[in-house]
Image (cartoon, grey):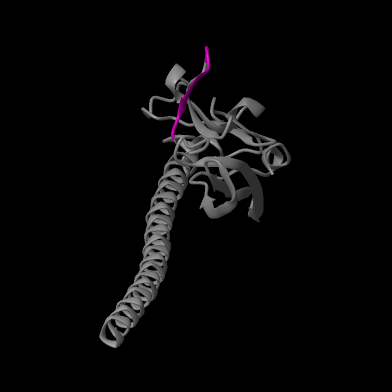
Amino acid sequence: MLATMSQRSQNGETLVGLMVGLGLGLLVLAAGSQMLAHQLRGHRWLLQDSHVHHDLRAALSAIGRDLRQAQATEDAWKLRVSDHCQDVFCDGEEDFKVSADRIHFSFDRNRNGRQDNNECLGFRLTKGEIKARTACEPEVWTAITDVGSLNITQLQWQVECAAQGRMWQRWVTVRLTAEWPGDTTRQWQGTQTVALRNAVPATQAPAYC
């Protein structure tokens, strides 16, 4: 009789120990799973950050490459010797204008001295995407960013001018603000200052500065 009671007591203690061990195991497993989920989330965010920075750099590079040529023409050195421009890339506000989140300009892409239909360029912000202008009339705009992977929330332009004799040199600073699609808490900014290739006569500066 005593042996039977002792056996039952030992069996009870083994079951309790098993339950305690199982509980501790589950607790460790839950903690490990949470840690793994946190690490995976952090890794995903790092990949997303890298992707966003790459897209921002690509957008700024594309803008800078074209903007640097604003109002440029092959013979500027001899066509802009007086107080007024004597070429079609420097004779009106359509050749360089900044308004809100849009900039447009022209330049002599093929160096023939005439303003052809594919020599009107520009950039604007439309529904979270930066679009580039590729034609004069009718205007043609092509997206250079994808709102599905990068939502551009702000596009700003700032023009600065400095007199160089009778000519004015110009710099344009572009600022981009972007966020991860669907997550307004994750935002990034990018800035680039571009020196324009050709200067303009001083009398034209008020229209472009």
Relative horizontal placement of residue 154, taking residue 20 as reference (left or right):
right
Of 48 and 202, which appears nearest the observer? 48
Is residue 61 among the parts visible in the rendering? yes
Q: Nearer the viewer, residue 169 or 12?
A: 12
Residue at horizontal 55 percent and vertical 54 percent from the top? 188
Residue 123 forms part of the magenta stretch: no
Of all residues, the one furthest to the top in this rendering is 138
Position of residue 142 in the picture relative to residue 203 (left or right): left
Which residues lie in the magenta part?
137-144
> With respect to residue 14, does 139 lie above or below?
above
95 to 161, vertically: above or below: above
Q: Is residue 51 above or below residue 96?
A: below
Quarter holding the C terminus is top right
Residue 92 seen anywhere in this rendered image of the structure: no
Give coordinates of residue 93: x percent, y percent: 66, 28
> Is residue 142 depicted above or below 166 in this figure?
above
Is residue 140 found inside the magenta-colored segment of the image? yes
